[in-house]
């Protein structure tokens, strides 16, 4: 959705490692906010390197939000650095049980530094991610562990969705 004037206030890329069905609840909740343009690529496992960087440049907005679940977590981390080369800084980064794909199943992902570091970052970790092996995010904020959540249910958790939507709404209010 966009505001009555058609202005995109927030561009949110929502990327699940196995595709948008994983993150559909988050995307749908964000679409209810006036002025938010949500981009959810339809991906298969072999396509999870969607060009978020291009999408952000195609839909200029005051605020940039990147949300990545599973393999999508590494992709949005990488995008912070890529976007910095275009002088675009991510305003809000959300990582949901991020899993590394390069090198495959690495136990650590690097948090971007300097101009590539997001202004705000939330990391959510499922209390029970077995058999998936989420990676630690070296240099990032401490993760919030969500009780009674598994790797695949984390994106559908009402408290996680509410936290993300509230943070985006607050960004929009502060940017007005």
Image (cartoon, rainbow, N blue to C red):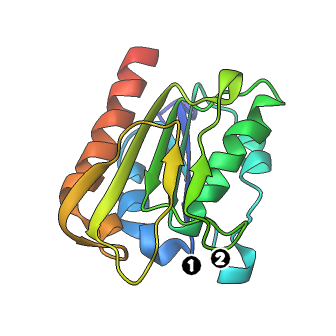
- Residue 142: x and y, percent? 36, 40
**Badge 1: how crowded within 10 Å, few (<14), some, or many (20+)?**
some
As helix, strand or loop, the secondary structure at mark 1 comes to: loop
Q: From this viewpoint, is residue 104 visible? A: yes
The image position of residue 58, as x and y in percent, is 77, 43
> Quarter-wise, where is residue 60 in the image?
top right
| C-alpha separation, residue under disc 1 versus residue under disc 2 | 6 Å
Q: Quadrant of the C terminus?
A: top left
Residue beneath label 1, please?
18
What residue would you read off at disc 2? 43
Q: Is residue 56 above or below residue 151?
A: above
Picture coordinates of residue 141, whole percent (x, y): 41, 36
**Residue at 33% across / 58% down in the picture?**
125
Number of dots carrying numbers: 2
Q: Are the residues tagged 1 and 2 within 8 Å (C-beta)? A: yes
Which type of secondary structure does the marked residue at label 2 adopt?
Answer: loop
Q: Residue at x 34, y 53 (%)?
A: 124
């Amino acid at each position: 959705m966009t505001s009555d004037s058609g202005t995109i206030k927030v561009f949110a890329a929502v990327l699940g490692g196995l595709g948008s069905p994983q993150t559909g609840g988050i995307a749908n909740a964000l679409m209810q906010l006036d002025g938010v343009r949500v981009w959810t690529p339809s991906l298969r496992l072999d396509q999870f390197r969607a060009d978020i960087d291009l999408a952000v440049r195609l839909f200029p907005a005051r605020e940039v939000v990147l949300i990545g679940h599973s393999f999508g977590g590494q992709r949005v981390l990488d995008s912070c650095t890529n976007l910095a080369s275009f002088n675009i800084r991510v305003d809000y980064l959300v990582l949901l049980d991020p899993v590394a794909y390069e090198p495959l199943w690495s136990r650590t992902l690097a948090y971007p530094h300097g101009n590539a570091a997001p202004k705000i970052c939330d990391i959510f970790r499922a209390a029970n991610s077995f058999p998936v092996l989420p990676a630690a995010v070296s240099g990032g904020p401490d993760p919030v562990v969500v009780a009674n959540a598994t790797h695949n249910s984390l994106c559908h958790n009402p408290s996680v969705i509410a936290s993300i939507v509230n943070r985006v709404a607050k960004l929009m209010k502060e940017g007005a």
